[in-house]
């Protein structure tokens, strides 16, 4: 079945350093979504990418969708302690059920 | 609006006991989902529903049953709990649209002894 792999599993950075997490799907995706989960919290939607090669920015966060629509990345510039949490990518196939396949997540720790 | 709510927040069961987790949403969303989250495994879809009265299996449905008798509620049942079902369970809902953003509840932490 469809699989979504995410790397790295953990990342420790010094505050102010950049951070990137990568997501790869075994199949072509119709769209990809990114979620953030703070420690002890629930996943919260960040963004959705739909078009091949699409890039979107949210302040210090940059999201990219690959040309083949099988991979994606999230880059955070100049991390802050408020960025701490686990970032998940989630891919959707071509069905209309809204089903998402989540990656394993990347847990980001930021040292002040 | 309360969004997505889940009850209970915590529960401890003994092996073989049964229980039902309740998810409710007040956003009039068509789609609802049940996930389990285990360390290093991300979120895995258990069952989902695309509308009132309909349910379907996700990635890891064994040992669980669901019902969606009302549009706003999605129930997850464990008939005979096993230690392997110790996990954090999240419910989510999304509107009937191409955007498909999922809104998650606060989660239920279940321990099976």
Image (cartoon, helix red, strand yellow):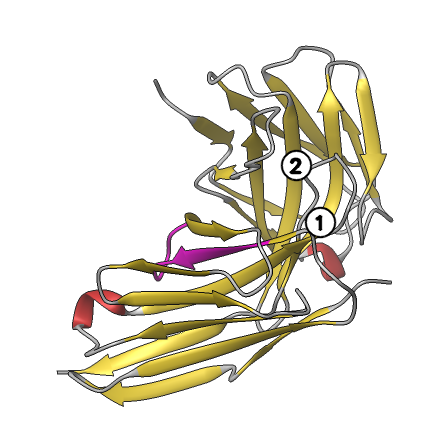
Q: Residues within 10 Å of mark 2 (few under 14, many from 20)?
A: many
Q: Position of residue A63 (x, y in %)?
A: 42, 65
Q: Quadrant of the N terminus of chain B?
A: top left
Q: Percent from the top left, x then y, of residue B27?
A: 47, 18
Task: Kindly give the residue lying farthest to the left in the view shown.
Answer: A112
According to the picture, the residue beneath numbered tag 1 turns out to be: B45
Vertical arrangement, residue A88 with respect to residue B26, above or below: below
Comes first in the chain, label 1 or label 2:
2
Report if residue B14 lies within the magenta region.
Answer: no
Q: Chain of mark 2?
A: B
The residue identified by callout 2 is B33
Picture layout, residue B4 above or below residue A65: above
Which residues are drawn in magenta? A32-42
Residue A50 got which mark? none
B19 lies above or below B53? below
Residue A72 in view = yes
Q: Residue at x 22, y 60 (%)?
A: A59
Kindly indicate whether the residue at mark 2 contacts the one at mark 1 (C-beta within 8 angstroms).
yes
Residue B35: x percent and y percent? 64, 47
Q: Position of residue A80 (x, y in %)?
A: 17, 73
Instruction: Indicate yes or no whether the magenta region holds residue A37.
Output: yes
Q: Tell me: residue B103, above or below residue B61.
A: above
Residue B74 lies in what quarter of the image?
top right
Which residue is at the front of the view, A87 or A53?
Answer: A53
Cα distance between the residues tagged 1 and 2: 7 Å
């Amino acid at each position: 079945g469809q699989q979504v792999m995410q790397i790295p599993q953990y990342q420790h950075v010094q505050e102010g350093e950049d951070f990137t997490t990568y997501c790869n799907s075994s199949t072509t995706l119709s769209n990809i979504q990114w979620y953030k989960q703070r420690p002890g919290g629930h996943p919260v939607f960040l963004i959705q990418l739909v078009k091949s090669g699409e890039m979107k920015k949210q302040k210090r966060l940059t999201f990219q969708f690959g040309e083949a629509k099988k991979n994606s990345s999230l880059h955070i510039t100049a991390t802050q302690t408020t960025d701490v949490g686990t970032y998940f990518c989630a891919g959707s196939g071509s069905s209309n059920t809204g089903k998402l396949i989540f990656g394993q997540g990347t847990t980001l720790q930021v040292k002040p | 609006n309360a969004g997505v709510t889940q009850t209970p927040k915590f529960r401890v069961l003994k092996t073989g006991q049964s229980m039902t987790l309740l998810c409710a949403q007040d956003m009039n969303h068509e789609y609802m989902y049940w996930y389990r989250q285990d360390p290093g495994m991300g979120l895995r879809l258990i069952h989902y529903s695309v509308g009132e009265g309909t349910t379907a299996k996700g990635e890891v449905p064994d040992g669980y049953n669901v019902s969606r008798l009302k549009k706003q509620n999605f129930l997850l049942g464990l008939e005979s709990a096993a230690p392997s079902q110790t996990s954090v369970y999240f419910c989510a809902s999304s509107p009937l649209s191409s955007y498909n953003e999922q809104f998650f509840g606060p989660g239920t932490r279940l321990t099976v002894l």
